[in-house]
Image (cartoon, rainbow, N blue to C red):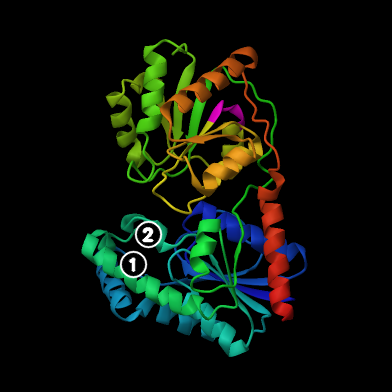
Amino acid sequence: MKKILIITDALTQPLYNVRVNFLCNSLVEQGIKVTWISEKYQDIPFKINADFIQIPFYKHKGIIGKIEWVIKNVCSLCCDYKNNYFTKKILSLTKDANFDLVFCSTFHTFGLKSAYYVAKKKNIPLHIDLRDIAEQCDINVYNKSKLSRLDVIGTIYRKININRRNKILKLADSISSVSQWHVDYIKQINPNTLLIYNGFDNQEFYFIPKKSSYFDIVYTGRWYGNQMQDTDLLFSALQEIVEKNLIDTSSIRLVWYTAKNIHHEIIKTAEKFGLKHITYLYDYVSRKSIPDILLHSSICLVLSSDDTQGIMTTKVYEAMGCEKPILCTNCSKGELHNIITDTNSGIATSNKDEVINFILYQYKIWQTSNSTHANSVNINMFSRQHQTTLLINHLKSLHKK
């Protein structure tokens, strides 16, 4: 295998970028040439070691840009205009190029049709990497377009895209996804589906003893609101701890690094439980800052839901890599619960008393050393290095067939 074509949707989500970019870098390190094509959305804040091509879809700004956006979204909903547009563009760009395999990574449906037709025309294997699937998500999470936030339109949009997606999935040579739930679900469409976790980069996320003057319970990254990531269990447990004076409130902080536009919702909940005085809110931080923030934390917070299937947040792996205790709330079953438990990385629970006991246990440890450490086991299998090796070995075997 000498050359691969990667097709992805717009590089708007850092965690999506990391997954594919890590694969790209690993391929290049093995002497495999990579051409990467995506929709042009914004300037890319990281280096891509590939022949990188961005194709613009929206070309205007201001009032004309808004009109263009509406027209193109309606056309895409009705007649798959966007996918047809990019298929034509990508076929033209790659008509004289030789590839050994097409790799398409997407969240929605973008790129699937293009990837299929390139692979078919060149008679080479197609591998599709589904980071998430529409069936697991609320309509508004699945498609951030304002047009689809109307329930009726959103429902129709999702059904149409699922049908379009499934037509291509059935034709792919193989598929990968990020959790066993995803794999089991997708296997109903295409049995040639394998599990590749997101994982953590062990060159960035690893344990170094760090002391902290505060007992910090830290949340980093996107928060989707109480519908998907309910905070009541956490705040209720902390409320009881504070009211019973089980912890010196001058030493504990609940620290959030998340989008400013949802800070008011967190403050509202904190005020409801009388915990505004220990709640600290900050905007997103750069990816480079996260390892140090986690290492200085006492507990890494993960907000989950037993009603949400298949979501394996990268926060878990990053905290696991730093070997910091993980508190995962509203999670009493499923794959996320099992991974945290099996690796001894923390606790995943929907039980308030268990949350309280876990916080108090870690607090006692922090009191003696101003630091905490999860005695995790078997976490190397969740490194990006290991997971990417599994994926590349699969792609090589696909090419040989």
Range drawn in magenta: 295-299
Residue at 24 percent across and 70 percent down: it is 67
- Viewport quadrant of the C terminus: bottom right
Q: Magenta includes 110? A: no
Q: Observer-nearest residue: 365 or 271?
A: 365
Query: Is 83 situated above or below 338?
Result: below
Q: In which quarter of the image is residue 260?
A: top left
Q: Position of residue 329 (x, y in %)?
A: 45, 36
Camera sees residue 315: no
Q: What element carries label 2?
A: helix
Residue at mark 1: 158
Specify whether 205 is left or right of 188: right
Q: In which quarter of the image is residue 167?
A: bottom left
Q: Quadrant of residue 154?
A: bottom left
Q: How crowded is mark 1: few (under 14 residues within 10 Å), some or many (20 or more)?
A: some
> Disc count in the image?
2
